[in-house]
Amino acid sequence: MSEPAPAPEVIVAAWSAFPEGSLALLTGGRGAGKSRWCDALAHAGRDAGLAVAGFVSPPVLVDGEKAGIDILDISSGQRRRLAEPARADLPGTQGLGWRFDPEALAFGNKLLGRIDSCDLLIIDEVGPLELRRGSGLTATFALLDARHYRLAVVVVRPALVAAMRVRWPDAASVWKLEEAF
């Protein structure tokens, strides 16, 4: 079960309604604007004086085509190239569609490991690399389990929502972006 994703400004305006340790999953199809929505939420949260932490994974567009994925540390603004399209001649990319840079993954895990507590935690995204292969940005799991946040919003593909609900059955909400954000 999912409900339409509220606008980021609505979430911030209703901040006091979220109990400590709330977890929401954000889902939507490819190109729905999940990363743009997360970026807008981070800005709205900061503008409201919230301590915002985590990462956004904006696409890298070349001539209007997705040519890569970056990882952007919300707190510091540091950015790394996280992934590039998979190539048949490179190992470890079967079934993913992307080749993930080990140094960028280490950067992401380090930034997640430094987060002690915050008001708003944004994780864009937990995908098959983490849920099915046990690799990638695995520091996400301990951070979410610790619940040292008021609200965590975690991006997950529609096909993986059920796996996330098994891992975190008390996820308060599943928000779906119905239209491009």
Image: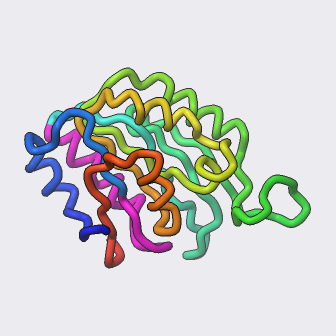
Quarter-wise, where is residue 34 in the image? bottom left
Q: Find residue 156 and report its horizontal and vertical position in percent.
A: 46, 58
The quadrant in which the C terminus is found is: bottom left
Q: Is residue 47 above or below residue 4?
A: above
Q: Which residues are magenta?
A: 26-48
In the rendered view, how is the structure colored? rainbow
46 relative to 3, above or below: above
Q: Nearer the viewer, residue 17 or 11?
A: 17
| Residue 170 located left or right of residue 96 | left
Q: Position of residue 30 (x, y in %)?
A: 50, 73
Asked if residue 55 lies left or right of residue 137, the reply is left
Extreme right residue here? Answer: 89
Which image quarter holds the N terminus?
bottom left
Image quarter of residue 46: top left
Q: Position of residue 170 (x, y in %)?
A: 31, 46
Count every numbered label the image shows and give the total: 0
Q: Main secondary structure of the magenta part?
A: helix
Residue in the image at 59% along x and 50% along y = 131
In the image, what residue occupies the spot 20% across and 62% down?
7
32 within the magenta span: yes
**Residue found at x 9% / y 49%:** 14
Q: Is residue 145 above or below residue 114?
A: below
> Residue 177 placed where, x, y %?
33, 70
Q: Residue furthest bottom?
A: 179
Foreground residue, 137 or 180? 137
